[in-house]
Amino acid sequence: MLDHMRSKVRYTHTILKWATGLALAGCLLFVGKFIFIVLQGHAANVKEYIKLQRSSNVDVDSRGKKCKERMMSVLHQGIFLGKGFKDFSVIECSNQQEVLEIFRRTELVPLYEDHIVPRLRLYIPSQSPSD
């Protein structure tokens, strides 16, 4: 999970380049003010991605100077059974139902329930089933 992006276009391009270069599938998921990165692939490649994310200039600070990502949180590392993602994509969701549908399609609902929902509940009001 990322804390913020000031230079969204540049940051997104960098994430896509790293993920595809390391043969990782998954998504960069924007939900309101939340930014989640879901990565699938060989453990060594995921580890290398995390290293790049934390040690490379990926964004700009409030003065426009290049900066490293210091506020990234790893919410889960492990194996989840399911179809998963076929490639790496950028997805923008406007509500929690859209997010749930992504995790249903990839058969990763436990990941969604255990790690995404608790964060979304803090800031996104519950929606009734009729929405």
Image (tube, rainbow, N blue to C red):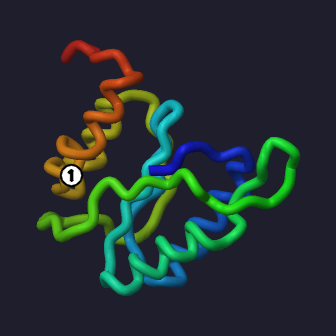
Give the class, few, some or many, for how many residues have Cα within 10 Å of label 1's Cα (few <14, many ≥20).
Answer: some
Question: Between residues 7 and 68, which one lies in front from this camera angle?
Answer: 68
Q: Residue at x 47, y 81 (%)?
A: 48
Q: Is residue 20 above or below residue 112?
A: below
Image quadrant of residue 41? Answer: bottom left
In the drawing, does residue 110 fall left or right of residue 53?
Answer: left
Q: How far across and down, in percent of the image, does residue 120 sit?
A: 35, 31
Q: How far across and down, in percent of the image, does residue 4 sit?
A: 60, 43
Q: Would residue 52 be seen by someone viewing this image from the given angle?
A: yes
Q: Which residue appears farthest toward the front when viewing the image?
A: 70
Residue position marked by numbered label 1 in the rendering: 111
What amino acid does circle 1 point to?
Leu
In the drawing, does residue 48 fall left or right of residue 44?
Answer: right
Q: Would residue 16 be seen by someone viewing this image from the given angle?
A: no
Q: How far across and down, in percent of the image, does residue 52 sit?
A: 57, 75
- Callout 1: helix, strand or loop? helix
Q: Residue at x 31, y 65 (%)?
A: 85
Q: Residue at x 46, y 36 (%)?
A: 31
Question: Between residues 38 and 63, which one lies in front from this camera angle?
Answer: 63
Q: How far across and down, in percent of the image, does residue 92 sit?
A: 50, 42
In the drawing, does residue 51 fall left or right of residue 108?
Answer: right
Q: Residue at x 80, y 60 (%)?
A: 66
Image quadrant of residue 27? Answer: bottom left
Q: Is residue 16 above or below residue 130?
A: below
